[in-house]
Image (cartoon, rainbow, N blue to C red):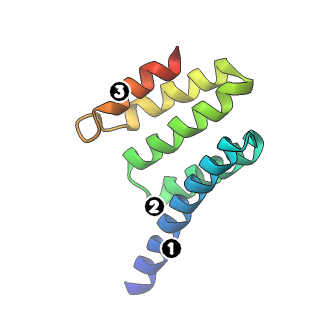
Amino acid sequence: NAVLLLRRDFALDRVQFLSLRASLHRDLGRFREAARDLQTAFRLGRRHAAPHARGRILLQLAEVAGFARPALGVRILDAARPLLDFHREPRLEIVLVHRRI
């Protein structure tokens, strides 16, 4: 159905926009806003995004959350690991290890 495809494409565009905006918030030190955008992106992505994309969102969220609550950041990294496709993006395994340090 064309309407469903448009709805899915809109949701995926929204996920990507929220991820980009969260990066900007993070760079500006606005961690609460970044976390809010990433949580929204992850919720939207549950229904529409591939597991790998959801894992990448969790990587971002782990970094943002880890500034204030390191233990939470590690738990989020643990949740991201099974979603990530390391064959597709091998460098993410290094990113995952680095962010745990």
On the rendered structure, is 52 left or right of 78? left
Alpha carbon distance from label 1 to label 3: 30 Å
Task: For label 1, count other residues whose C-alpha is less than 10 Å away and answer few (under 14), some (14-19) or many (20+).
Answer: few
> SS class of the residue under badge 3?
helix
Nearer the observer, 62 or 31: 31
Q: Are marks 3 and 2 in contact (CB under 8 Å)?
A: no
The kind of residue tagged 1 is Phe
Give above or below for 43 relative to 63.
below
Q: Nearer the viewer, mark 2 or mark 1?
A: 1
Residue 18 spot, x, y in % from top left: 60, 57
Alpha carbon distance from label 2 to label 1: 10 Å
Q: Quadrant of residue 5?
A: bottom left
Task: For label 2, count other residues whose C-alpha is less than 10 Å away and answer few (under 14), some (14-19) or many (20+).
Answer: some
Q: Which residue is mark 3?
A: 93
Q: Which mark, residue 27?
A: none
Q: Which residue is mark 2?
A: 48
Q: Which residue is mark 1?
A: 10
